[in-house]
Amino acid sequence: MKPIRTLVVDDSAVVRQVVSGLLDRAPGIEVIAACADPLLARERMRLSWPDVIVLDVEMPRMDGITFLRQIMEERPTPVVICSTLTEQGARTTIEAMAAGAVAIVTKPRIGLKEFLLESGDELVAAVRAASRANVRHLAARAAGLTAKATQKLNADVILPPSSPSAMVKTTERIVAIGTSTGGTQALEQVLTGLPRVCPGIVIVQHMPEKFTAAFAARLDSLSEIVVKEAASGDRVMPGCALIAPGGKHMLLKRSGAQYHVDVVDGPLVNRHRPSVDVLFRSVARNAGANALGIIMTGMGDDGAAGLLEMRQAGAQTLAQDEASCVVFGMPKEAVKRGAVMRQVTLGQISTEIVAQRR
């Protein structure tokens, strides 16, 4: 197989050196160039177009978002954002994701070389996932509008499996959504398509710590419904979507007639924190037939087991179809396990959520 031809664009010489070395050592990846800014990258791309671009956001002469938008207009190409882990940087990086970037790999302001060396697996996985992404969807939506672990754990480390019959069906409906690669733009399309009156929604989007607050704030500004980063004790209410914080698991709980969420620490589950499986299992246990589970675009299998538990508990279950996914990995695995009742297009998901209203 041909190697994944990768271009690194970052104004830090240390980042260019370390990232290039990490990727070049990874089987199946070739760094064709490392450039200090987008203008130099442009000159290099005239000679040879990369399969994947690893891109910083804040750079001299041209910022990464402007460069990304130009690329998506001219020739859509998978882009992995390598951005500083700060609140200010998070807001900027969310703009980059909205403009069509596939994934985020974070970097700190200090201890950069050591951090990148320790996070090499995450970066390599992000580049490989990006190379398989359907960027035509990302580019079209932009125009219209991964974690490291030595052992893969399942949701048992956070809470035990649900009982066969979680609870009797009631009038209170819950929608649980899990997504990863390509999910930032997909969720934007879904949530902005919802009316103010719709069922309460709980969401896991695989995203690093500090980025989910900015992501939720962006969606809130664009949507009729309220969108916020979840905190322990938050009520799950009609017309509101709660997004699990990066670096924490989110669980649905029930107290009497009310639902709320708990945000908890814990080990990585399916190499992710937050994990879709953890959320879906908690929904199976505490909402059962009162829930709709939706698994959307993403790499890997997180959420497939949890969605099956939801279906077995009486919930309705949907998967985003392959044609509208950026990466069909998570929905495909859920379908394979028999967890999915129906596959729908991305454009149909908002309608399916509204149909749950009682």
Image: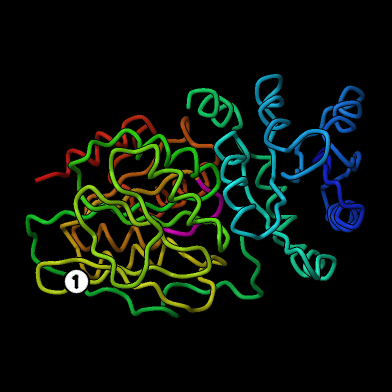
Total marks shown come to 1
Q: Does residue 349 lie above or below 82 as drawn?
A: above
Residue type indicated by callout 1: Arg
**Looking at the figure, which quarter contains the N terminus?**
top right
Q: Nearer the viewer, residue 257 or 168?
A: 257
Q: How packed is label 1: few (under 14 Cα within 10 Å), some, or many (20 or more)?
A: some
- The range drawn in magenta is 298-303
Horizontal side of 202 relative to 34 (left or right) equals: left
Residue 289 relative to residue 33: left or right: left
Asked which quadrant contains residue 69, the reply is top right
Q: Overall secondary structure of the magenta stretch?
A: loop
Determine the residue positioned at 22% across, 47% down.
239
Residue 77 in picture, x, y percent from top left? 70, 31
193 relative position to 187: left or right: left
Secondary structure, mark 1, is strand
Residue shown at the point (35%, 35%) measured from the top left: 192
The residue that disc 1 covers is 254
Residue 214 position in % (x across, y down): 50, 52
Residue 62: horizontal and vertical position, in percent?
Answer: 78, 33
